[in-house]
Image (cartoon, rainbow, N blue to C red):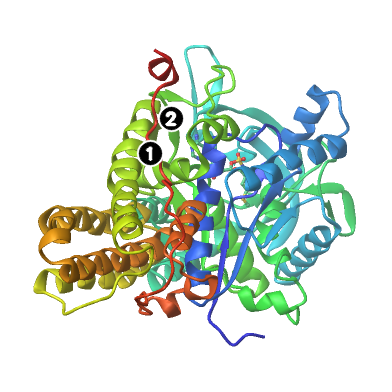
């Protein structure tokens, strides 16, 4: 074991009833940035994503595709796996709920819940949404003008279900959950979601149906295999299956409890109410934090299969590049808020923030260094107050970004980095190194050193967000791989180091029609 601090982050596991769209890419991106940051910051990291393959919804989707559930889930799960490469994600593992080890883990958890006296056999009679795979109380449903009854965060249709079912005594857990939220104020974020969950629990909890008998695609209940475990009990368990549950001597058990489960705002009840109750009942520590992200619409419309407007991650990254898309998703909208994916806004950010601000800074500085400073890191003379001010701001960024990442405030981390980029661009203009070339070449060299060093620090922090682009820039500054972790953050550029020929990293995006004319 490493002895380093651990960091475990997870994405929701994705239903395999449909192919991935940009909304699915979003939670995984947030986890990827945290995982990459923490690895660079010296943590022992585990980053998990995967697919949620059981339940009625998936069984129905397989039937509609004329395939067996297993063949269907194999196929769709692969498209979520492929997304990892498309978006340059770096998970440590990809879990599938159809894996054998996961059945064993779910059944072990079930047996613990039985042993705790929290499971009993009864009969469920109530509303169920197959789309949400969720049960709803009568007063949570409404009947629309079309005569259809709906419920839940996206108002999906519900149907009446009446069948024998095992129940989890959730009603007995309300006070313990409220106490848990009280003692762990960071457990649910953002704050608005925390309030939403607390008032839901204060409103009184009903026992939860945790098995179904009307279909067969899932994990059988131990000792009563006519019953299939409720898909959410199965799905949530993935987070501990990965760590070896119930075998706490598994080396991966060191990662439990998870540091951050990133989830969408539609699935917080499962993660913030059911999940900690199941775990506490089984004597397992609940996760440390659940962060609920908002939802993306596209050009003002809800993403929907029937509208055919889902942004395909493959198409959008082919057109704009992976890193600009990664940057846009995390910079455009504060994490936790809803956002609208607008092509115009993406192009705007790509050109303003990436090509003009950051790309241009690197390009200007590196080409002067190549042309006028003999393609080596320039010598560093005495530093002026302006030099020290800029270097100080770049140095202070690590602590700022670290704190923002711990709050999942990715947009604020990026804003802080881009403020230093703007400072550096102002500094270039104010120092006018091209004029110094004639009057004071030694001062010109110092100015170029200060700028190259500022780009180095900024780029070290850009790495988790835009790994490929950052790597290209660090190569141009001859920063070796082993000097890219944050232990080397204060390891300044050494004058005289030979630099490769500079190359632009962020080209301006020009609309193809305009480019052609
Ligand atoms: N299988 C469950 C999660 C189980 S976790 C133990 C599930 N799957 S899902 O595929 O329907 O959704 C996965 C995630 O994608 C959810 O967090 C959901 O909020 C998110 N998104 C789906 N559409 C989205 C947008 N349009 N925008 C942002 N996120 C979206 O729920």
- In the image: residue 252, left or right of residue 206: right
Q: Which residue is mark 2?
A: 297
Residue 405 location, quadrant: bottom left
- In depth, the one of 192 and 327 nearer the eye is 327
Measured from the top left, where is residue 317 in percent x and y? Answer: 53, 36
- In the image: residue 93, left or right of residue 490: right
Labelled pair 2, 1 in contact (Cβ < 8 Å): yes
Residue at the (59%, 52%) spot, across then down: 89
- In the image: residue 142, left or right of residue 220: left
Residue at the (74%, 70%) spot, across then down: 112
Q: CA distance from mark 2 to mark 1?
A: 8 Å
Is the residue marked 2 within 8 Å of ligand 1, measured from its CB?
yes
Residue at the (76%, 73%) spot, across then down: 246
Mark seen at residue 338: 1
Mark seen at residue 379: none
- In depth, the one of 368 and 79 nearer the eye is 368
- Position of residue 72 relative to residue 467, above or below, is above
Measured from the top left, where is residue 434 in percent x and y? Answer: 18, 54
């Amino acid at each position: 074991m490493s002895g380093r601090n651990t960091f475990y982050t997870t994405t929701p596991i994705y239903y395999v009833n449909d192919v991935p769209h940009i909304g699915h890419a979003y939670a995984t991106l947030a986890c990827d940035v945290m995982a990459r940051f923490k690895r660079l910051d010296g943590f022992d990291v585990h980053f998990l994503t995967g697919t949620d393959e059981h339940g009625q919804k998936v069984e129905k989707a397989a039937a509609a595709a004329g395939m067996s559930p297993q063949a269907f889930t194999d196929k769709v799960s692969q498209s979520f796996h492929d997304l990892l490469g498309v978006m340059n994600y770096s998970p440590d593992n990809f879990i599938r709920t159809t894996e054998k080890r996961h059945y064993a883990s779910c059944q072990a958890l079930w047996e613990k819940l039985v042993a705790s006296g929290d499971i009993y056999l009864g009969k469920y009679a109530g509303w169920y949404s197959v789309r949400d795979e969720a049960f709803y109380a009568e007063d949570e449903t409404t009947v629309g003008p079309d005569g259809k009854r709906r419920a839940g965060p996206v108002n999906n249709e519900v149907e009446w279900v009446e069948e024998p079912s095992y129940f989890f005594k959730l009603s007995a857990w309300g006070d313990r959950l409220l106490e848990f939220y009280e003692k762990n104020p960071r457990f649910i974020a953002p704050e608005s979601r925390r309030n939403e969950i607390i008032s839901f629990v204060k409103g009184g909890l009903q026992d939860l149906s945790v098995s179904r008998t009307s279909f067969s695609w899932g994990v059988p209940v131990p000792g009563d295999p006519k019953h299939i475990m409720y898909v959410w009990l199965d799905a949530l368990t993935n987070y501990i299956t990965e760590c070896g549950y119930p075998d706490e001597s598994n080396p991966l058990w060191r990662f439990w409890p998870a540091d951050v489960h990133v989830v969408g705002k539609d699935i917080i009840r499962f993660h913030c109410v059911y999940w900690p109750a199941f775990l506490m009942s089984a004597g397992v520590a609940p996760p440390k934090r659940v962060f609920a992200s908002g939802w993306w619409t596209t050009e003002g419309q809800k993403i929907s299969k029937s509208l055919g407007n889902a942004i395909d991650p493959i198409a959008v990254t082919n057109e704009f590049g992976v890193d600009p898309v990664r940057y846009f998703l995390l910079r455009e909208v504060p994490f936790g808020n809803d956002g609208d994916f607008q092509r115009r806004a993406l192009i705007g950010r790509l050109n303003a923030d990436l090509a003009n601000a950051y790309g241009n800074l690197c390009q200007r500085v590196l080409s002067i260094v190549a042309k006028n400073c003999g393609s080596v890191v320039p010598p560093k003379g005495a530093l002026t107050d302006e030099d020290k001010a800029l270097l100080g701001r770049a140095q202070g960024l690590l602590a700022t970004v670290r704190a923002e990442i711990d709050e999942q405030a990715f947009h604020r981390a990026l804003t802080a980095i881009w403020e230093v980029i703007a400072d550096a661009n102002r500094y270039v203009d104010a120092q006018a190194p091209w004029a110094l070339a004639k009057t004071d070449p030694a001062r010109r060299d110092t100015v170029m050193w200060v700028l190259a060093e500022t780009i180095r620090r900024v780029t070290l922090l850009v790495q988790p967000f835009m790994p490929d682009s950052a790597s290209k820039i660090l190569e141009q500054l001859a920063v070796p791989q082993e000097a890219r972790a944050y232990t080397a953050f204060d390891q300044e550029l050494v004058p005289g180091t030979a630099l490769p020929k500079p190359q632009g990293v962020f080209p301006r995006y020009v609309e193809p029609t305009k480019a052609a004319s």
